[in-house]
Image (tube, coloured by chain):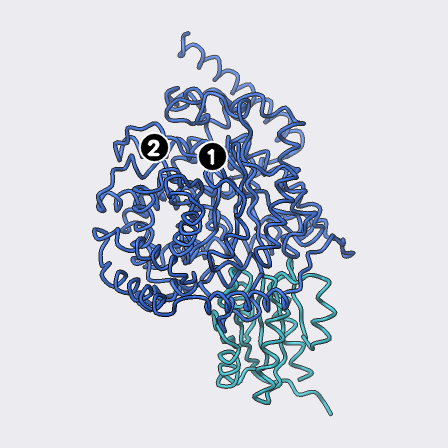
Amino acid sequence: MDKGKDLDRVRQMEMQWEKNFTEKYERKHGFKMPESQTDSGISLKPVYTPSDVADIDYGEIEMPGSYPYTRGLYPLTYQYQPWMTQQIHGYARAEETRKRTEKLTKAGMKGFGGAVLFIVPDLAANYGYDPDDIVARGMVGISGVSVSTEEDIGIICDGYDLSKTRVGFSTKITCLPMLATYIVYAERHGYKPHQLNGQSQNRRKIAWLGQNTRDHPPKDQLKLQLELIKYCVENMPRWNHTNLCGYVAGENCASPAQEMAFMLSEAIELVECGVQTGLDPDDIVPRFSAQMHMGMDFFEEICKLRAFRRMWAKIMKERFDCKKAASHQFRIHIHTGGINLTAQQPLNNITRASLQVLASVLGGTQSLHTSSYDEAISLPSEDAAETALRVNQIVLHETGVPKVSDPLGGSYYVEWLTKRLEEEARKVVDEIESRGGYTKCMETGWLWNLLDQRIKGWRQEVDEGTRVIVGVNKYRQEETVEVPEFTMDQGEVERLAIERIKKWKESRNQGEVKNALKEIEKAAREFESVEQTGGLMPVLIDAARAKCTVGEMTEVFFQVYGCVFPY
Amino acid sequence: MEAVKKEKIRALFTRHLMEGHDMGLRAVVSSCRESGIEVVYYPRFQAFDEVVKVAEEEDVDIIGLSSSSGAHINLVEGLIASLKEKGMDIPIIIGGIIPNKDIPRLRKIGIKGIFGPGSIPGEVAGFIRDLNVTI
């Protein structure tokens, strides 16, 4: 093939197009092409041609299943195995959540082979309070399930084969105590840590920033993240130790390029610090998992997934000299955007979710959580949660999309945008690095300001109407659409949860509890630098054996490391 | 009697520690400040007593609560009870994810303004100024 000759021909084609464009639109209709750009601010042309991809080395794109995995991690994508439908769920007490799990499982929610228990703790548990804590009044069983002890976990997990079931608790500041509690629950049912399959979120910093809430200073958060990583690498080879969370960034209006950069910067820092704790990058990297955001900028979001896989592979191979293929292969879980959902004309949200699921699949995700259409109105009703699952099943079974791997690969536009997005994300990664790294940028407030500007920009665009949201600032209608509502007797749920935890606390050997909490305090105080990683998880597991609650263990950390807010 | 309009309106805006979202609240705070309302922004509280204390010390005319978690009824009832204990009666407005079904109940409790999803931040400032005329 004579590339030079081909490009000459392409240039001729482009000139002809220019001529046609000028004659038809500019001269005849006086139309001026408006400037357009992606959500990350990348300027777009009205059409793309072979010359836009002429400088891309085919080695950057490759085949699905080959480094750098732009086109997917494996030779086959969904032809062999559909994506996991991991619907995060949880409300009221463990009993009600178990019923919701069963209902979703019956409706088709599943992982690769086994069941999925992807559980979100309630507000109280999320922020480190047991249901009987005074701060938790009115907050128990809301936005998640009340879960503070092995007993609660048991009601959710009893009867499942823990070696085959994917179990994850969406925890932030309670991440270590919750893992310790789960390990002890599993131990009592005959499972060793190395058999357990699932994940910890271990992504507290972005949750702290994005939700503007309480946690320890970022450097202490980092130490605790590393403690969990080290324990998992050494004891739980099947456990995903850290969920890199672009989702929270996306929900705070981060652009796709910024979201990618936040995830990469955090991973880079965790691997570097992991090495300081004595671990090999090849032991750490394969067990990173992800929760990426899926917004509405269809093609940029597709390219985000493609570009992210490529950047990950290159960084892990070139920077950290990782040898294992699993270290180069970044497995993606998508959470469709909550920020894109509207309370007005709520059924429109099913359309939004459908487009987001389609983009996720075209981008080659391994796993999906699809938001329910009623999430801008209330907590998800059963009907809405089931419909969210159905969106996936329709894309999987009715559209024919999964028949071909990376169906958009080779598109001039998609390959060009994938490359441009990589460049944009790289700029942000470099900037974060030049400012001292991810944790430092949390401490200085630089990341906060970055997101704050994006949030203000988003607000302004919506108010001015330059960013159209159908039903909100365009095609608005005054009559409201009623949708099935989520209802729960919160007062009763809270009363029962308090009763249960009081009984749990009375049933313990109080001396053992006191000693166990003291041991946590001692280990936490001695844990001064990342090199000392490894002393905390064992005492937390002992504390869970002594029936200490997640709230009690978390409180010790606040006493030792203190409490700070981003803003 | 002719309604007396105060020169400067003072509004306290806050949310519970366990409310994970504050984008809307921050937008409302900026918008109110721009429109000339004196805003006391208390980013988060753990107990209602804190809110009551700030409201008293700062002598605010109105309290704005933000809730997206589903706990709005509990929050409003808790705050009103704490204000009553101190013999205080300050109008409350609420914004965030407030289901339609809860609006009648919130009105009955005495909530003056309810700003659900899709509200424009500027609406809140306008509402507060209009309310001030009748205070």
Residue at 49% x, 39% y is A333
Residue at 47% x, 17% y is A11
Q: Position of residue A223 (x, y in %)?
A: 29, 54
Q: Nearer the viewer, residue A66 or A433?
A: A66
Q: Quadrant of residue B89?
A: bottom right
Tell me, for residue A305, which label it has, or none. Answer: 1
Residue type pointed to by label 1: Leu
Tell me, for residue A51, which label it has, or none. Answer: none
Q: Position of residue B6 (x, y in %)?
A: 60, 85
Tell me, for residue A327, which label it has, or none. Answer: 2
Chain A: colour as depicted:
blue
Q: Secondary structure beneath disc 1?
A: helix
- In this rendering, the answer to whether A554 lies above or below A83 is below
Residue type pointed to by label 2: Ser
Q: Position of residue A37 (x, y in %)?
A: 51, 39
- In three-dimensional space, the C-alpha distance between marks 2 and 1, rounded to whole angstroms, equals 17 Å
Chain B: colour as depicted:
cyan
Residues indicated by labels 2 and 1 sit on the same polypeptide chain: yes
Of the 4 image quadrants, the one containing the N terminus of chain A is top left
Circle 2/circle 1 CB separation < 8 Å:
no
Mark 2 Cα shell of 10 Å, populated few (<14), some (14-19), many (≥20): many
Q: Position of residue B82 (x, y in %)?
A: 57, 82
Q: Chain of mark 1?
A: A
- Frontmost of labels 2 and 1 is 2
Disc nearer the start of the sequence (2/1) = 1
Residue at 40% x, 8% y is A2
Q: Nearer the viewer, residue A114 or B72?
A: A114
Point out the residue furthest to the bottom here.
B1
Mark 1 Cα shell of 10 Å, populated few (<14), some (14-19), many (≥20): many
- Is any part of residue A174 visible from this angle? yes
